[in-house]
Amino acid sequence: MLQGMKGLTMLNISGTDGVDDDVLEAVTCNLTSLTRLDISECQGISEKGTRSLQNLIQLKELDCGWNSRLSDLLVERFPRGLTRLDLSYCSGLTDHGVKSISELKELKVLNLRRCSQLRNKSLEYISQCSNIVSLDISYTGMSSKGLEKLHMLEKLEHLDMCGCSH
């Protein structure tokens, strides 16, 4: 079915029943023109399935939010050309995983809302993404004390840190 959709550039399969590692692999092997992919709330996808994301070299926007099974290994496999990344509510993500985000040099929008294991160390890694214009770190384990690490983000226009400690 997917073979006939080679020109597809955007796919939203968020919250779709039955989306698992095999489906994600079929998507990434057949729809290599994708520039935007939304796999949020697809609880059947694990780190095993995310290996195939590397096939999407044209991918610019990726939404993996609300996937409790995804953790640090997922981030290491992201295509390096991403400009927008949503990992909100990915409770398995830690500071180690955010370190891999620092390699996404084109990243402009990053959403880490409710990634509860993240601490101020993550801000040090995020500060290496000099193109970020929008950052959501609300309801994480980060605090206002870590904000000094963001001084290098000269393009930052929007910062949401609602619910972070002082």
Image (spheres, rainbow, N blue to C red):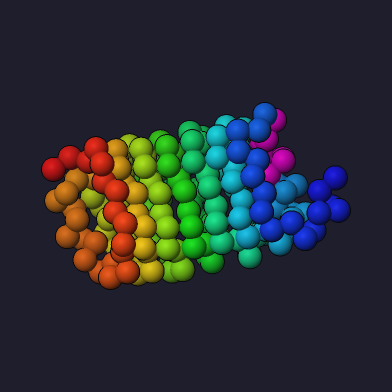
Picture quadrant of residue 43: top right
The structure residue drawn at horizontal position 26% and vertical position 46%, both measured from the top left corner, is 161
Percent of width and height locating residue 141 = 25, 40
Q: Is residue 113 visible?
A: yes
Q: On the picture, is 46 further left or further right than 24?
A: left
Q: On the picture, is 43 further left or further right than 131?
A: right
The magenta stretch is 18-24
Q: On the picture, is 160 further left or further right than 108?
A: left
Picture quadrant of residue 108: bottom left
Percent of width and height locating residue 23 = 72, 41
Residue that lies at the very extreme toward the top in this rendered image? 17
Which of the two residues, 28 or 166, is positioned nearer the viewer here? 166
Q: Is residue 141 visible?
A: no
Percent of width and height locating residue 2 = 81, 48
- Number of on-image labels: 0
Image quadrant for the N terminus?
A: top right
The structure residue drawn at horizontal position 41% and vertical position 54%, both measured from the top left corner, is 110
Picture quadrant of residue 8: bottom right
Residue 20 lies in the magenta stretch:
yes
Residue 93 lies in the magenta stretch:
no
Which of the two residues, 62 or 78, is positioned nearer the viewer here? 62
The structure residue drawn at horizontal position 49% and vertical position 36%, both measured from the top left corner, is 66
Q: Is residue 75 above or below residue 40?
A: below
Which of the two residues, 46 or 12, is positioned nearer the viewer here? 12
Image quadrant for the C terminus?
A: top left
Q: Is residue 147 above or below residue 104?
A: above
Percent of width and height locating residue 102 = 39, 62
